[in-house]
Image (cartoon, rainbow, N blue to C red):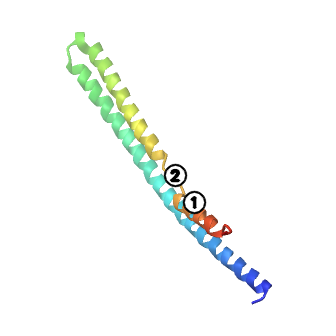
Amino acid sequence: MSLIQSAQALLATVLGLARTRLELLSVEMQELLARLVLIMIGAVAAILLAALALGVGAVALIMAVPPEHRVAVSAGLAVAFLAAAAIIGWAVRREAKERPFAASLTELERDAKALEPRE
């Protein structure tokens, strides 16, 4: 096998490898986009319904207590809502830390190690 044929074979192998990695990246992009759309729709629906339910429930609770305790109940509800918002914010932040394109990056790292010269 001549040097030119070896170089062509190597180039064909590298191009095939790059094509495979780009296809994987494309699939991951499609999955990420579909997941993002579902998360956004679900989040907006949940936020709207939860806000409506909490607002109506808070007003009903405040109206149900005697007038002299309404300020204390309102403050307690505000603290409870703030704590719930903090917990939900923490959970969303934790979920957002997931590394996108993890499979593609792992495969590229493996490819780079495989192409390194061996001693």
Kind of residue at disc 2? Arg
Single out the residue that lies furthest toward the top. Answer: 68
Element on which disc 2 rests: loop
Quickly name the residue at label 2: 99
Q: Are marks 1 and 2 in contact (CB under 8 Å)?
A: yes
Horizontal side of 87 relative to 18 (left or right) equals left
| Relative image position of residue 117 (x, y in whole percent) | 68, 68
Query: Viewer-proximal residue, 40 or 2?
Result: 2
Quickly name the residue at label 1: 105
| Relative image position of residue 85 (x, y in whole percent) | 39, 32
Kind of residue at disc 1? Leu
Q: Within 10 angstroms of label 2, few (less than 14), some, or many (20 or more) residues?
A: few
Horizontal side of 91 relative to 111 (left or right) equals left
Q: Residue at x 35, y 32 (%)?
A: 84
Q: Within 10 angstroms of label 1, few (less than 14), some, or many (20 or more) residues?
A: some
Task: Specify the quadrant that holds the C terminus.
Answer: bottom right
Horizontal side of 68 relative to 104 (left or right) equals left
| Relative image position of residue 68 (x, y in whole percent) | 23, 9
Q: Residue at x 72, y 77 (%)?
A: 11
* Label tally: 2
* Vertical order, 51 against 58 (above or below): below
Location of residue 64 (image quadrant) = top left
Q: Residue at x 52, y 62 (%)?
A: 103
Q: Residue at x 59, y 72 (%)?
A: 20
CA separation, marks 1 and 2? Answer: 10 Å
Q: Earlier in the sequence, mark 1 or mark 2?
A: 2
